[in-house]
Amino acid sequence: MSDSLPMAGANVQVNAAGLSKADYRGAPSTLCVGCGHNSIANQIVSVCYEMNIVPENILKFSGIGCSSKSPTYFLNRTFGFNGLHGRMPSVATGALFGDRSMRGLGVSGDGDSASIGMGQFKHVMRRNVNMVYIVENNGVYGLTKGQFSATADKGLELKKQGTNMYLPVDICMEALASRATFIARLFAGNAKQVKEVLKAAMAHRGIAVIDIISPCVTFNNQENTYYSYDFGKANEEMMHEVSFQQADPSFHQGSEGSSISYIPPKPEIMLEADMIEGEIREVKLHDGSSIQLKNLEKGYNPTNRMEAMRVLEEAQENNWLLTGIIYIDPSKPALTELSNLVDTPLNRLTEKDLRPAPETMAKINSLMF
Amino acid sequence: MTERIVNDFSITVGTVNGSGSSTANTTILRALFKMGIPVSGKNLFPSNIQGLPTWYTIRVSKDGYLARRDEREIVIAINPNSFAKDLDSVAPGGAFFYADDIKLAVTRTDIAVYPMPIKSLVKSNPEITANLRDLVSNMVYVGVLAQMIGMDMTKIEQALDFHFKHKAKPIALNMSMVKAGAEWAAANLEKKDPFYVESMNKTDGMIMADGNMAGALGSIYGGVQFVGWYPITPATSLAESINDYLPTLRKTVDGKETYAVVQSEDELAAIGMAIGAGWAGLRAMTSTSGPGLSLMTEFYGLAYYTEVPVVVWDVQRMGPSTGLPTRTSQGDLGFAAHMGHGDTNHIILMPGSVNECFEFGWRAFDVAERMQAPVLVMSDLDFGMNQWMTEPFKYPDVPMDRGKVLWEVDLEKIKGDWGRYVDKDGDGIPYRTIPGNRHPNSAYFTRGTGHDEMARYSEDTQTWVRVLDRIKRKYETAKKYLPGPVTHKQDGAKIGVISFGSTDPAILEAQQMLAGKGLKVDYMRLRSLPSQDEVFEFIGSHERVYIVEMNRDGHLREILMVEKPELATKMSSIAYNDGLPLTAKFVANAILKLEEK
């Protein structure tokens, strides 16, 4: 499809797909000024631009709530489906069978995923549906003006609601228990890390759950509470510095399947000089991309489920905002790879592919009795 | 002895559910069918896996009537717990067969009574090991009955051959018990009742199938590509049959699949997936029953407003609530016609035979994609789970209608100038693009929130009204794409009957009964909603019209009355639902009673 891509004007900077940043933008945001969700939308635009992703190769999904409004704020040239409250996963599951060369990009929130949508959230994990699943997590229902969500900390006080009596749901722990193959926790205020992890998530095969602590400046941004900017800025503990290296084009030439990116030739990736062996952990993705994790204080191994459970438990006990890639397993096939589907996208099949031949009718009738 | 009654009576078998009696009962049904005698079989079963009373009733009808009858001329009692009730239920002059290990008194003298030594016959066969005894013991009553009413043994063998998929060993084993029963009856029982079967040729060219399998096959011939489903009685076997037949009918020559089936976590997800797939250009469906349909309602409204093609099968059972999960009903219609909040009206296909379950299986996709709308196919448990004799399935006689879709080449031709909800042709049906279209102007954003013709978010009052009115116009257009009613007229009839679905055989028979009593009735069977003008012309041209349906409140009548209030006084309701398929006698008596007033 690369030859038919429209070229931006001569003065505009374009990426290898021939697209300018404007080609990745969406409608202006109508969320509150300072909302963490806006910075995430901006990162999505940058990530797709920098990865040379062809917008028509992505499908956007969302449920209902502030977070779920945001898919209109990025990737105008991408099909999107804003469905029902808590039901984004099922719509995405069906839609991604239409053309399995596409990757889903879903944006949900803590209200949409951790309460009404908990069932579908967990089942989309175990099916390893081929999508990035962002939870813009702020511990509060914004669009209905400030009720506790299921991720709100016990003891949190909100103006109209009083004190939260219940223990919080941990999105990452739920994802881990449901066998998600990529799980990350991020802080919306840390743009650099959001960008690198988003890139890795886009390149991952199957489900990539990203729990982004994204403060609600209007209803839940009190000092010293977990979901506030202040808390995040003061207390975020990165488990590692993440840097994503997109697949080498030579790898793609010989591999099966197609990439969502337009991939130009580029020089070989070199490790930075100050990253000495032992501190760097490299995770290869199925398409040849790699994630390099420079471990900070802990020698953390994100390919081990037990380790992942341990750090999540520790973080919860100590109220740490621990960020980074918590778990990754690049080896599992995505849902659409589990069955032996035809190479042509299912939605390009025609009557001759779909309607059994006339001569089969007599045979079927004879099978009836 | 009284005069012989040939090919015109009903047989009821009372057994314990989970005891394997369904093999025996369908063997009787199929053997009679192969003898050329019109038959219908109905399984009246509990919502249980093992241990509760269950009945199977077979009607043989030389005149070809397929409706259930209440009268039981022959009763076979195998279950001690229902023995007294079963004995009571035998029509005077009828025949009562029972397992002689049931040590209960047979008190009636107005019927023929035949004890059957089922247990001892099974035990005396050395080839049947203890673990197989229960499995084959039911075949003894097949043999006894066959001997006493004159069934053709070779046809029984054919039925077993079919049931056991030509596997010699189980066929021989079961057949040996059929023969043992028949031989014992020939030697020990004296015929004291008047009921006989004789071969005819009235089933030539017909097949036997259930509606769920027919719907499944129809869907496959309609090119189904995605099924999201969740198990629920009585719809389960529809999705399971799709799973059974897809690999043989729809794999490519190199063994690849042109479809995907996902058993979902619940009905919400089942329809959510189907809507996602329908939006992404696949022929997508789900199948469910009332409780599942209730859960699917929010999504159904979304599909209506976002104009996504999707097919939903509702194999109805008794509601409200969990209701009677194994009993048939037409009680979902009122709810289904306007499923969803706000202003909605839905396209409903209503098959009236197992053959039509097949036809509407494929047709539903054409309608859904043409109309860009959810389409509900309303079947019921009686069709879905019972074996019916029916016309053979007919290959679709029209090419697939994929509706108004713009691919890359189409967009290039119009230079990308299009809007998702623009009514370009004035028929209320817009054009759609499909995700995966790589044209830079192809994408649009689908939302359940207010949107304008370009699919942009809008809270503008006039835009909202305009879009909703346009969708209503689309449903006017729909009428010409929907299967019209089927009418059975009688010369000079002044009154009419309207019905839909599985009540058809009872009404056809009632029409003859009433004619016999000098009352002529025209009968119209609806096959879809919204109704075409023809339906109201029918009502308008009769003095009175009885609307017959299997629910309490007369849902179809309500729908028709609201549609044409000026005709409301002509419409009377005959609505009744006790979970059993309607009988002709009930319908005829109800009409006679109302006519007397």
Image (tube, coloured by chain):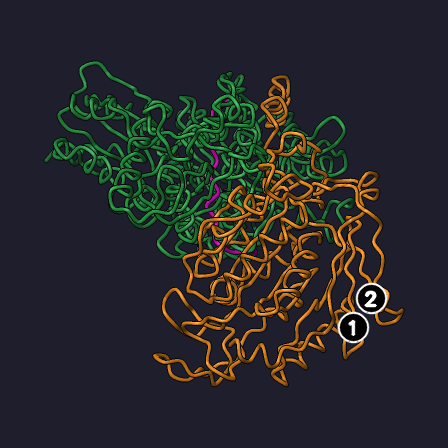
Mark 1 or mark 2, earlier in chain: 2
- Image side of residue B437 versus residue B426, left or right: right
Depth check: give the residue in front, B51 or B366.
B366
Chain whose colour in the figure is green: B
Drawing shade for chain A: orange
Contact? badges 1 and 2 (CB < 8 Å): yes
- Image side of residue A238 versus residue B198, left or right: right
Q: Badge 1: few (under 14), some or many (20 or more) residues near its Cα, within 10 Å?
A: some
Badge 2 marks a residue whose secondary structure is strand
The chain containing the residue under callout 2 comes to A
Depth check: give the residue in front, A135 or A245.
A245
Point out which mark residue B121 bears. Answer: none
At 59% across and 61% down in the image, what residue appears? A122
State whether residue A245 appears in this view. Answer: yes
Please name the amino acid that badge 1 sits on: Asn
Magenta stretch: residue B60 in it?
no
Point out which mark residue A281 bears. Answer: 2
State whether residue B199 appears in this view. Answer: no
Q: Quadrant of the C terminus of chain B?
A: top left
Badge 1 marks a residue whose secondary structure is strand
Q: Badge 2: few (under 14), some or many (20 or more) residues near its Cα, within 10 Å?
A: some
Depth check: give the residue in front, A39 or A216.
A39
Share a chain, discs 1 and 2?
yes
Please name the amino acid that badge 2 sits on: Arg
The chain containing the residue under callout 1 comes to A
Magenta stretch: residue B40 in it?
yes
Residue B491 point in image, percent of width and height: 21, 14
Residue A23 point in image, percent of width and height: 56, 43
Q: Quadrant of the N terminus of chain B?
A: top left
Residue A289 point in image, percent of width and height: 77, 52
For label 1, the residue is A295
Q: Magenta part of the protein: which range?
A: B37-50
